[in-house]
Amino acid sequence: MSTPEPSAEDTAFHSPPGGFAPPPQTKSGRTAELWLTLFAIAVVFAALVIVEVAMEQHLTWDLAKYAAAYTVLMVLAHLVIRRFAPYADPIMLPIVALLNGLGLVLIHRLDLADEETQAFLGHPAPSSDANQQIIWTLIGLVCFAVVLYFLRDHRVLSSYSYTLGLAGLVLLIIPALLPARFSQVNGGRNWIRFAGFSIQPGEFAKILIIVFAAAFLVSKKDLFTTAGKHVFGLDVPRARDLAPLLVAVVLAIGIAVLNKDLGFALLIFGTILVMIYIATDRASWLFIGIGLFLLAATAAYFMFDHFQQRVEVWLDPFATYNTSGYQISQALFGFATGGLAGTGLGSGQPNTVPFAKTDFIMATVGEELGLIGMAAVLMLFAILVIRGLRTALAVRDSFGKLLAAGLAFTLAFQLFVVVGGVTKLIPLTGLTTPFMSYGGSSLLANYILLAVLVRVSDEARRPPAPPARRNPTPIGDAPTEMVRRVE
Amino acid sequence: MNTPMRRVAMLVMAMVVVLLAGVTYLQVFKADELRADPRNQRVLVDEYSRQRGQISADGQVLAASVESGDRFKFLRVYPANPHAPTSPEANAPVTGFYSLNYASSGLEKAEDQILSGSDDRLFGNRLFDLVSGRNPRGGNVETTINPVLQQLAYDQLTSQNLTGSVVALDPRTGAILAMVSAPSYDPNLLAGHDGAEVAANWKRLHTDPRSPMLNRAISQTYPPGSTFKVVTSAAALENGATINDPLTAAAGLTLPGTNTVLHNYADERCGPGDTVPMIEAFARSCNAAFAQLGIKYGADALRDTAEDFGIGPDTPSIPLPVADSTVGTIPDAAALGQSSIGQRDVALTPLQNAVIAATVANGGVRMQPYLVEELEGPDLKTLSTTAPTSPGQAIPPDVADELTQMMIASEQGTTGAGSVPGVQIASKTGTAEHGSTPKQTPPHGWYIAFAPAQNPVIAVAVIVEDGGNAGLSATGGKIASPIGRAVIEAAVQGGQ
């Protein structure tokens, strides 16, 4: 797709002054978005009812509470977009609403299983994680609205790029500096915990670093596409042009690896690499990046025990079934039991997988909704990412392009790492499934990410301002304007 | 920038395709292998919702699965039969229990493959159920138990609030006719679907000081006391002794190499003379005489004969696991003297003691005890029938005849209530000391017997722990023999 020509309408045909009719309105897509959102809500309703029936629950006000809260939140999100980003992509919100809703249903389903287990053991019922997730969704959507309200033009972000990048690094460093009791959860030191409240700063740092990378790459674009050497037919870019970005990325990855947050390290690395590739159009970067990755992974394999352990578990999880391989083994049993059509919502045993609500929520999808459900969820993510990349193609400014592409790709890459991990395609690294996993940080960060994408897409799809509003400028005073770049 | 962006979009699509390929491999091609993995508990959970087969005895249902209407679909029940007496408590040592949260025991565990329907022999049935769309069902287990005897023996123990066990065998085949342990428990308490309730019941049963969930018949060993004189006599008779050989009639015997005197019961002399024929010493159950007899023929003879009766390691399952019985270590003559009267380290399960009686009854041919008569498919078609097997001739037929004579004499000299008119019983009682202060601890009372003596159809072993209700003055004759005779009466008159 090419950049729309702002003056295309003017040159299509000549109309007399005053015109025959108003210029054709570009469809905002808001009506489509509303209907799609309502459809997503209907699907989530149906899923919720199936879970309740299959798990022998009575249809209670509790159920109505979940449904009502979810419906109100999603409709409000639609209204926020209608008010503050009226030309935004109409597909993104409905997909996110469906993913988030499905996640809620699965978390509720796992809650019920936990209650049952605890009841069997004669313990009191645990607190409901679905309730908590609803609250996180509310906070996430508040953040979503706040971003859309204050960030009227995404280009503003590029003026604060260094500040934001630095903030991202600081967020990452905090857990490493905190004593373990404030930062450690399940072996990884990537949390900030205080007063019963905990956040994973990496989720937010990811967005900040992508913003920084986009702004930086755009500002240095001309420099490193022209300078550089040719080695073996490859254009090797000059490293010093990219120094600040490389330093930031190496720092971020280094901190993440030290905190045993391998998933995050991989995510940042892949995303930034792809952003550099997009900005420079130099495949050499990809080769260099992948080479470096292989070197670093090999080195890490020999340096870190937990890294070796991950690889061993990946190669044969059943060899260590009773210890480190248990989780992935259970997930694999779940996928196998689900088969093509799944056991049906509420009819499987996904709660036998440790961390089924967070890192392994896709194992629940695989078990209860089967291959068909997995394919559906993967396609939803694929469409969301492709819409993000379309936004990147359509938006006119380079910063917006890189930002949208980076944010969209990071979603895709995270999905790949998570789903690949739980299906034993690649070694497991702890990451959440965006919008579906239980957890406040992940949900909040992803709603902020969505808000930025929506903002960029609003810019991309906004029809040009009517020519009449332009103040005619005498040709002599007009600034030099680049109409089109030949790429 | 747009060209590389389009390539990235292609990369994203490729990533999704790779993920889909991976998931397809896992959920379609690898699925069967993973589903069949024994560690996959999901398959187990699946079995809970399959209709489990029945456990029955002589046409009576001891355990069955009924539709529960909840998400587990079926509830395991152990019914009480109002028409013919059978109660879940009496049958518990046979059926065991089947629970969602506490696994299973008894036949529920031993024959789980058949009952759950996952046995290979039921493959055809599973396939048919799959094709016909019918819910797969498990196979059935028909036991050798005679429910009338089972209930009678249980009632005999519980009506007097006794702790103990009764085992009844068909000496000709080894079929277990009754296997009772008291006190017992109701397996329905553990089969429910209300987890909290089941957990509470489980805790209560496990903390009960009377151990209602212990299967005393096969999982517990006891000193056999004087009932072991059958084995000591067999060892002697096999090695050239006769039933009229003279043995000491003294009230006590100083064990060789010690100052310890081994006393007769109540420290009585064994008859008026200096010596007493073996058959009379057996009938009077004189300890000094049999300690002397055992020492005379040596530890190896006793050990060999005990082994021929089935006392030793690697006891075969029935198919429930059976604790090993043992004669213990016999380091010297003094130990041999004590072991010869079934004390010291000799320890038998009630089942093993029943096997000893049954072997004598069966002309010296020991039959392997078994609990499962027949395995059936869900359609009641026979899958397999247990054929009686024998580990061999434990003692020569003439020795068995001589032992029978001695046991008839013993029965005639035994006190205790109950006799079966017109039926000659051959038996031996035992009063076994145990505990750290044996003289102050009420003894275990034993009674092993078979009947009719000339054409035996039943062999029993009865143990009543800790003197029953008779305290320190308890003897096997007083507390155990009435129960044994009641079981024999029911068996013989019931046309067994």
Image (cartoon, helix red, strand yellow):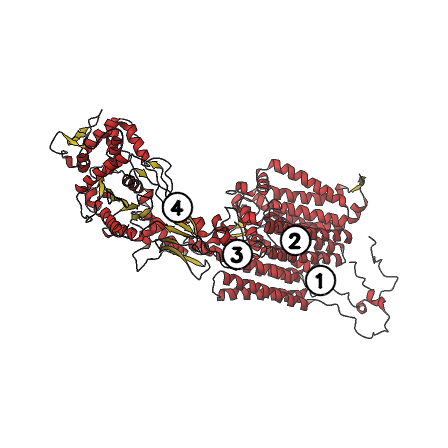
Report, in whole angstroms, how far the alpha carbon at label 4 lies from the one at label 1. Answer: 80 Å
Q: Residues within 10 Å of mark 3 (few under 14, many from 20)?
A: few
Report, in whole angstroms, how far the alpha carbon at label 2 lies from the one at label 3. Answer: 42 Å
Going by the image, does B132 lie left or right of B68? right
> In front: mark 4 or mark 3?
4
Check disc 2 and give the amino acid type: Leu
Q: Residues within 10 Å of mark 2 (few under 14, many from 20)?
A: many
> In front: mark 2 or mark 3?
3
**Residue of label 2:** A411
Q: Chain of mark 3?
A: B
| Relative depth, front residue between A257 and B441 | B441
The N terminus of chain A - image quarter: bottom right
Asked if the residue at tag 1 contacts the one at tag 3, i.e. Cβ–Cβ closer than 8 Å, the answer is no
Q: Which residue is found at the position 68% from the left and 41% from the top? A: A293
**Residue of label 4:** B386
Report, in whole angstroms, how far the alpha carbon at label 3 lies from the one at label 1. Answer: 55 Å
Check disc 4 and give the amino acid type: Thr
| 3 and 1 marks on the same chain | no
Q: Chain of mark 4?
A: B
| Relative depth, front residue between B72 and B457 | B457
Q: Position of residue A393 (x, y in %)?
A: 75, 57
Helix, strand or loop at label 1? It is helix
Check disc 3 and give the amino acid type: Leu
> Tag on residue A122?
none
Helix, strand or loop at label 4? It is loop
Q: Residues within 10 Å of mark 1 (few under 14, many from 20)?
A: many
Residue B192 visible in this rendered orientation of the protein: no
Report, in whole angstroms, how far the alpha carbon at label 1 lies from the one at label 2. Answer: 19 Å
